[in-house]
Image: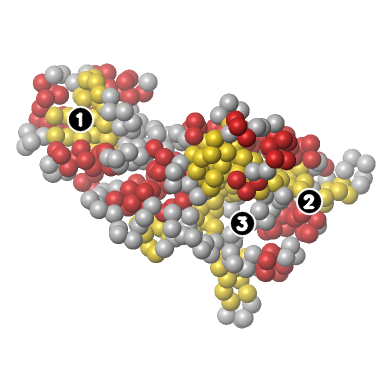
Amino acid sequence: MRQSELFTKTRREAPKDEVSKNAQLLIRAGYIHKEMAGVYSYLPLGLRVLKNIENIIREEMNAIGGQEIILSALQDPVLWSKTDRWTTAADVWFTTKLSGGSDLGLGFTHEEPLTALMTEYVSSYKDLPAYIYQLQTKFRNEKRAKSGIMRTREFVMKDLYSFSRDEKEFREFYEKCAGAYKRIFERVGLGERTFRTFASGGSFSKYSDEFQTVCDAGEDIIYVHQGKNIAVNKEVYTDEVLKDLGLKKEDLEEKKAIEVGNIFPLGTRFSDALDLMYTDEDGKKKPVVMGSYGIGPGRLMGTIVEVLSDDKGIVWSKEVSPFPVHIISISGGNNDVVAEADRLYDLLKETGIEALYDDRDVRAGEKFADGELLGIPTRLVVSEKTMSEGGIEVSQRANGAATLVPESGIVDYLNT
């Protein structure tokens, strides 16, 4: 894509009412637009990043047997009343009334509707297990919408629900999903900083596993055991819990962290309430054992910016970045340089390498500053100097390392 055709522009300053680093940088770089507190729109570059994160999540969920659907965001209170969550979760709901006077809610999670749906497809042990997920917009009446895209009132959530015959089958998948989450965080560049964390299950279960990324902008306090690569959330940091996990207080480090994912054992709470039963091999009826597994792609995007950015701007990993390559043409009015940069752009396009091409007629300093702010991992510079030296200057956003690569070898270099 030619940067001169991109309708968004970078900004020198962030909005004065935006306090979180992720939102400040993403707004300045033209990735997102703030509509109101806790509500953001994704612009072309931001949507590319969000979709890349969603695709990583999708690939890992499919690899462990997940099947993707999309459920309705509009929710009937009759169904939710069966689990008492229409009223007990009243502080979370965005609700309204239809013209006929009946109540309607905007879904903040989907255990109830999916469990009800599965009653039409599960009757025998032969129908299980099943692992169903979606990447779908959720709405929550968030009281603390102040952390940029990490805590919003409207957001995309990957929520997967497992349906198993018994506890053993459920636990096997639970661990598979935990492994998939680990791979997701590694692929987006947060693997070394993210810990599986023993935590409270909130309204869903007594206990759960969170995945917490160590960051000073985090709202949670966790206690990390570096050697075992696990942590304990402060809310369940008791002697009893530490004993169960085989941990000693003196081996743990206190850290601030951002919750980037969670997995919940649900047991039979929802299957009992909504009559999701199956007949086992002996002809006996049993409730389906369930689990819930969540990751917010937007929250993950914001966390990447909080953790990996530097004083110059955003730093994306290759798999997440809106483009893998950023071409910068420094022509100084030299048409030969422009022609060479155009040829490079066309060459990469022909070989399947997407690039953002800064072909704008602006000062070199502005191009370099915008490149640092945008955070695309690999920068290719074409200038009179690089042409005289017979190559293209290739530099890495993460560490600034630069080298001169002959144009004849640039495709092979970028594909390694």
Badge 1 marks a residue whose secondary structure is strand
148 or 292: nearer the viewer? 148
| Above or below, comparing residue 253 to residue 39 in the picture | above
Q: What residue type is labelled 3?
A: Thr
> Could you tell whether 16 is left or right of 47 in the image?
left
The residue identified by callout 2 is: 268
Q: Nearer the viewer, mark 1 or mark 2?
A: 2
Give the Cα distance between marks 3 and 2.
17 Å
The C terminus - image quarter: top left
Q: Which amino acid does label 1 sit on?
A: Val
N-terminal label among 3 and 2: 3
The residue identified by callout 1 is: 381
Give the Cα distance between marks 3 and 1.
47 Å
Q: Where is residue 252 in the image (x, y as percent from the top left)?
A: 58, 34
Residue located 32% across and 20% down the image:
412
249 or 235: nearer the viewer? 249
Q: Position of residue 242 (x, y in %)?
A: 68, 37
The 10 Å Cα crowd at callout 3, few under 14, some 14 to 19, many 20 or more, is some
The 10 Å Cα crowd at callout 1, few under 14, some 14 to 19, many 20 or more, is many
217 or 48: nearer the viewer? 217
The residue identified by callout 3 is: 109
CB-based contact (under 8 Å), mark 1 and mark 2: no
Badge 2 marks a residue whose secondary structure is loop
Is residue 292 shown to the viewer in this render?
no
Q: Residue at the left extreme?
A: 333
| Above or below, comparing residue 35 to residue 209 in the picture | below
N-terminal label among 1 and 2: 2
CB-based contact (under 8 Å), mark 3 and mark 1: no
Residue located 72% across and 35% down the image:
243
